[in-house]
Amino acid sequence: MKSTNKVIYKIFLLLLFAFCACDQSERNSGTGTISYVPEDCTMRGQNEFVYKVMTDTYLWNDIVPAIDPEVYATPSDLLADARNESVDRWSHITSETDYHSYYEEGKYFGLGFSFQYDNRENLRTSFVYKHSAAGEAGLERGDILLEINEKTVEEINNQGLWESIMGPDEPGITVELKIRDENGEEKYLLMEKNDVYINTVLFHDIIEVDGKKTGYLVLKSFLETTKKELDAVFADFKNVGVDDLILDLRYNSGGRFSSAVYLASLIGGSNVEGKIFQKHIHNDQHRDWDRNYSFLKHEYAINLSRVIFIATGTTCSASESVINGLAPFIDVVIVGDTTCGKPVGMYGHDFCDKRIQAIEFQVANADGQGAYFDGIPVDVAAKDDVSKKFGDLEEEMLKAALDYIASQPD
């Protein structure tokens, strides 16, 4: 079952257009800007451009092997041989159009849901985007998937169909699911692949226990559109005067750096304003690109001295930056499982309708703490209970976070 889980995770990272866990740092005052472009868009020209990036701005450029760009069939093949295999799990090449649609517009093409196994080996929906084919069809977190396109989950596993069962990402492609909902009712849902408009805030609520108000926020990713969503949530949190915050990043694999510092500033407020959030450190050829980025001032900041994070092995990159960046200044508690371990980031460069996303800097917080390639460890262990909705007080991870808050003296 573990190998099946790996296949499902891989497929749905692609279906959800997660690209990779990428700290997408916007360029600032020339930082991350290269002066060269491909000589032409022939395959040789593209390969030579990628090799130039890898020997110039790539964080581990000093160990890139000497290779002949002309012998590679694609730029991605060249990148695979050039990158630091011992630690770099993220450098890749993607579509320029898809990249900008996803990170800047919050949009991708597909169905708009993900799934995973629960502790009884039922395959359940883990989350659904509201403005998607899946959301409009009524699919919800916790629904058990019984069949996809008339194939049972067991048949899909046995026949190795996960990479093809949903069909190509093209207009007009339909997918039929047979599900069992939380009431035990079995039903069929028919959905057609289309543009998915991502709500990065999957859920938020204010939980009141023993007279204390705790804000609860489930955040899926950091996109350019995330900032507006966060403003609405934190305006609500500030208006009611939350005493604590549980920030659920269990499925958040990263995204835009600017949205990460935006969130961290909303949390810490006056406790962190103007202080260093994150340092970006480059290879020896580009130390002039090194920068310190500070927390911002925000109207809806809630000025907390403590935050409880819910994390898993999918909590990555910009998510880890929020955790690591706040740690020197406020009490940071992690519930769940060790994070993915990505203390590095990339700027990205467009070329010939493609975009190379190569690791170009390492990150550290104000105390110089970084290099968490093995992930950031948890304080309270807990498992994701996908059988329960977000906000259910009996869901294991949320319950563990609330129990931690209740156990602390006022």
Image (tube, rainbow, N blue to C red):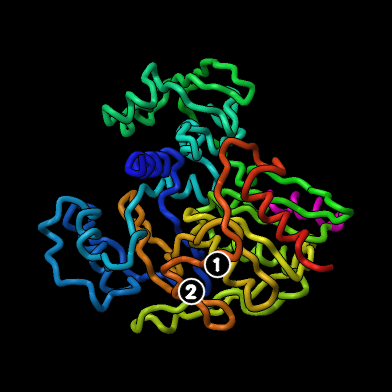
From the viewer's side, name the closer residue of 344 and 170.
344
Q: Is residue 223 visible?
A: no
Q: Amino acid at mark 2?
A: Val
Q: Could you tell which of marks 2 and 1 lies nearer the N-terminus?
A: 1
- Vertical arrangement, residue 339 with respect to residue 110, above or below: below
- Name the main secondary structure of what is drawn in magenta: helix
Look at 13% across and 67% down and name the residue there.
Answer: 67
Judged from the image, the secondary structure of the residue bearing numbered disc 1 is helix
Residue under circle 2? Answer: 363
Q: Amino acid at mark 1?
A: Ser
Picture coordinates of residue 22 (x, y %)? 45, 58
- Vertical arrangement, residue 387 with respect to residue 373, above or below: above
**Quadrant housing residue 135:** top right
Taking the magenta stretch, the answer to whether it contains residue 234 is yes
- Placement of the N terminus among the 4 image quadrants: top left
Judged from the image, the secondary structure of the residue bearing numbered disc 2 is strand
Taking the magenta stretch, the answer to whether it contains residue 407 is no
Picture coordinates of residue 381 (x, y %)? 57, 58
Residue under circle 1? Answer: 321
Look at 20% across and 62% down and name the residue there.
Answer: 81
Q: Is residue 7 left or right of residue 52?
A: right
| Spatial CA span between label 2 and label 1 | 8 Å
Q: Is residue 126 left or right of residue 21?
A: right
Q: Which mark is residue 375?
A: none
Q: Residues within 10 Å of mark 2 (few under 14, many from 20)?
A: many
From the viewer's side, name the closer residue of 318 and 410.
410
Count of numbered badges drawn on the protein:
2
- Placement of the C terminus among the 4 image quadrants: bottom right
Look at 42% across and 73% down and name the residue there.
Answer: 361
Picture coordinates of residue 29 (x, y %)? 52, 74
- What stretch of residues is rendered in magenta? 228-241
| Image marks 2 and 1: residues in contact by CB distance under 8 Å | yes
